[in-house]
Image (cartoon, coloured by chain):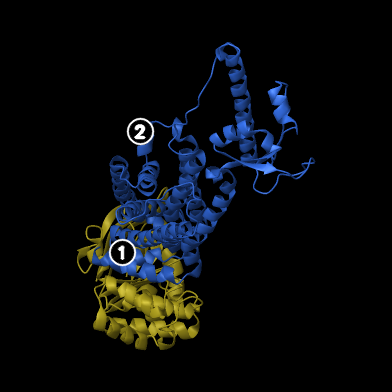
Amino acid sequence: MNRMAFIVYRKEITDMMRDRRMLIAAFSFALLGPVFMGVIFMLTQDSEAESRQTSLAIANMNQAPGLVAFLEKADIAVVPYSDGEAIAQLPEGADAVLNLPANYGVMLEEGRMIVGRLYVDESSKAGIRRGRQLERTIDGYSSYLASMRLTARGVPPAIVRPIVTSKFDLSKESFVAQTMSGMFLMLVIMAPFIGGLAVAVDTLAGERERHSMQPLLAQPVSAAEVILGKLAMVSTFSIASTLLALTTFLLAISLVPAGTLPIALYLNLYTVPFIVLQLIPFAVLIAATQLFISIQVKSFKEGQSYISMFMMVPMFVAYVKIFGAGKLSESAFYLPILAEMESLGSLIFGGEISLSHMVSSFAVAVLGTVVLTKLTAKKLESEVMLDAA
Amino acid sequence: MIIVNNIAKAYGDVQAVRDVSFQADDAKISTLLGANGSGKTTTLRSISGLLKIDGGGVTVDGIAVTEHPMQAQARLGVFPDSFGLYPRLTTREHLAYFAEFHGLTAAPLEAAIEDVCAKLNMADILDRRTEGFSQGQRMKVALARAILHKPGNIVLDEPTRGLDVMNIRLLRRILLDLRDAGHCVLLSSHVMAEVEALSDHVVMMADGVVCADGTPSELVALAKQANLEDAFVVLTGQQGSAKRNVA
């Protein structure tokens, strides 16, 4: 950095560090973000705990060894139920209760129709899903018995069941895992937006409002040097906020019991330097954009309004990625923020570098920063900068 | 020395100044005297390299402001129409920040701060943040900021506005000291008593043009009036004829 820009940078850092509101605005997200993540985690806990076995309690279980074996083969935990006839609520640990008649074995032997009552709790998504799973498995057992009986009587089962389907899940990760990883990336991406917001507004719109722009521009320092110093200051806040947010998020995740998180994180000596390298130019680009917005306005309040609106951009893009990634073309993932999320996603959740996305986001960051900084410096040379609103 | 030569500046349809010319010499206090909106601030901003003039030219110690604004600014100390202080910085930090742009660092910088602090009697506010400063204290910081690097030319836009008598007297003494030390001091004002007490050379402006130019006594004689105030009324009242009165 050249000497004049460094003088501006040093003054700006001193100035901003003395404003408690600026510091709270810049770093609160990094500290509150993990809490937000925790809430999301808790909200998704209900449906994400898919790895746990579905459990079924069966009344008169000793009468149905064949059904029990079939269920266990389908990875369902089966336990006997002996709490009596009246079933008002599910026993602890069971996802459903199947009430078989006391003479189940005899009825099965005689080929009579057996009515088994399946008690489920559909008050949660997981309850609905597990209830359906059990219903399907029991129906599957019923179909299995029917085909055995038909085969024993010389009738091919295909006559009564001409089509049989088998489902194969080809998705790389579950929807919950996709949402969780998308939300995590969104929070990381938003950190530079929040970190630089208040200081970017104060350093240009605020300076203009305080009428301190005029004495500054009357000094033998070029507009480019002033903007460079201010960009360095806003970038410092953005980068610090981003790295702090990343650290606190990772610390929070490390506190989650192993195996309960639906996403795997690849954070090691290989990926972390690339993650940091990826985030730094992005944070500088956001700082340059915020300064560009800040110089267009005359007052701190006006600047806050516009830069807050700018905050909607990463949120919107992140939601598009989370909920509409399948509908986007391949080339869309090379756009700013999306390319950033793709590259970071590959590093954090895949442990590998997506070179094309990384190069694309780096090039956009460098080019964008240069263009926006030049435009901001040009605007600073304008006479309108001398007077406030 | 500052030479203003036929400058013109318009803001959209409004012609702020046109054909303004005068010379502010070293070791003299020159004053732009004019009513509100007469073009004083536009003229001083043009000299400070803050505006792009539409025509004419300004030189500061022979350096053309339009062509070499930063070289000209290095020879100027500017006291703008607003103090423009940073409320979270101390007076010392203000002074150091602006002085560093002029190449002052380390021991020479500290010595310059101590020197200006003694001159302006501002030791009590030197290490205080400027938030909550009185008008007089703000003026001292802004003035110290303009003269700390000992520029050859000092430009002040209505420096006495909002000040009490004691601070006006202090400011007046500082400006006279600067003149006596050989600096070119150029200020703007619409306060007759102040202009009369301070100025070696007065440039009267009205509606963006220079109406008259000379020492206070020459201008009084030219207008055939008893005092500068009456002379100002008479001389600026003639500007409609677009005639410059030369004393």
The quadrant holding residue B246 is: bottom left
Name the residue carrying label 1: B47
The quadrant holding residue B234 is: bottom left
Amino acid type, label 2: Ser
Residue at screen point 39% across, 46% down: A349
Compared to residue B53, the image places residue A122 above or below, namely above
Instruction: Look at the image and give the colour of chain A.
Output: blue
* Pick the front one: B135 or A374: A374
* Pick the front one: A120 or B44: A120
The quadrant holding residue A248 is: bottom left
Residue A120 image position (x, y, % from top left)? 69, 38
- Farthest residue to the right: give it: A86
Compared to residue A253, the image places residue A46 above or below, namely above
Residue A229 image position (x, y, % from top left)? 32, 62
Residue at screen point 38% across, 64% down: A214
Callout 2 and callout 1 share a chain: no
Residue at screen point 61% across, 29% down: A136
Quarter in which the N terminus of chain A is drawn: bottom left
Which chain does the numbered disc 1 sit on?
A: B
Instruction: Look at the image and give the colour of chain B.
Output: yellow
Amino acid type, label 1: Ile
Give the numbered dot on residue A331: 2
Give the numbered dot on residue B78: none
